[in-house]
């Protein structure tokens, strides 16, 4: 390789590294990575009623999924139905 290509590659990689470092420092300064209270608030405000509601929602989703699968199976049966000769 020629010296100019190596110098150009070093210059571009240094520029991109500096750009990444600036972006990281900007993110830290503006609080982009701060999430200190998320888990504490989730534990504090997640009471028994909310857990019960979540369980009920999961059960409803399971029932709806089973109904959809049943309808799909019935449609498949009707699709392949052939009357007797």
Image: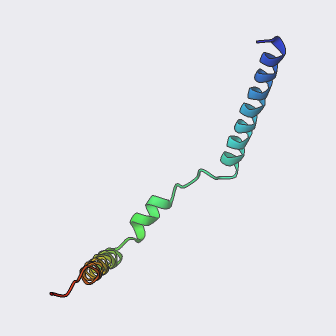
Left or right of residue 61: residue 2: right
Q: By what rule are the colours in the image chosen?
A: rainbow
Task: Pick whichever, 41 or 85, lies toward us.
Answer: 85
Q: Give the residue displayed 80% in from the left and 24% down from the top.
A: 11
Q: Nearer the viewer, residue 82 or 60?
A: 82
Residue 19 is drawn in which quadrant?
top right
Question: Would you say 51 lies left or right of 85 here?
Answer: right
- Would you place residue 20 above or below residue 3 in this image? below
- Furthest residue in direction front, as rendered: 85
| Residue at the extreme right of the image, as rendered | 4
Which residue is nearer to you in this view: 52 or 83? Answer: 83
Place of residue 3 in the rendered image (x, y in percent of width and height, measured from the top left): 82, 12
Q: Of 53 and 13, which appears nearest the observer? A: 13
Q: Quadrant of residue 68?
A: bottom left
Q: Residue at x 80, y 18 (%)?
A: 5
Q: Position of residue 58 (x, y in %)?
A: 31, 74
Q: What residue is shown at x 52% (from left), y 55% (from top)? A: 36
Tell me: residue 16, above or below residue 58: above
Question: Split into 4 quadrants, where in the image is the C terminus?
Answer: bottom left
Q: How far across and down, in percent of the image, does residue 35 sit? A: 54, 55
- x, y percent for residue 57: 33, 78
Up the image or down, 62 lies above or below 29; here it is: below
In the rendered picture of this protein, how many numbered marks are placed on residues? 0
Q: Residue at x 23, y 83 (%)?
A: 81
* Vertical placement of residue 25 versus 57, above or below: above
Q: Is residue 33 left or right of residue 79?
A: right
Point out the image quarter for the N terminus: top right
């Amino acid at each position: 390789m020629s010296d100019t290509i190596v110098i150009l590659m070093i210059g571009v990689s240094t520029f991109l590294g500096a750009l990444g470092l600036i972006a990281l420092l900007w993110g830290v300064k503006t609080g982009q990575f701060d999430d200190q209270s998320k888990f504490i608030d989730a534990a504090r405000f997640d009471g028994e009623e909310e857990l019960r509601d979540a369980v009920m929602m999961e059960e409803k989703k399971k029932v709806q999924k089973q109904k959809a699968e049943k309808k799909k199976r019935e449609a498949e049966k009707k699709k392949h139905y052939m009357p007797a000769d």
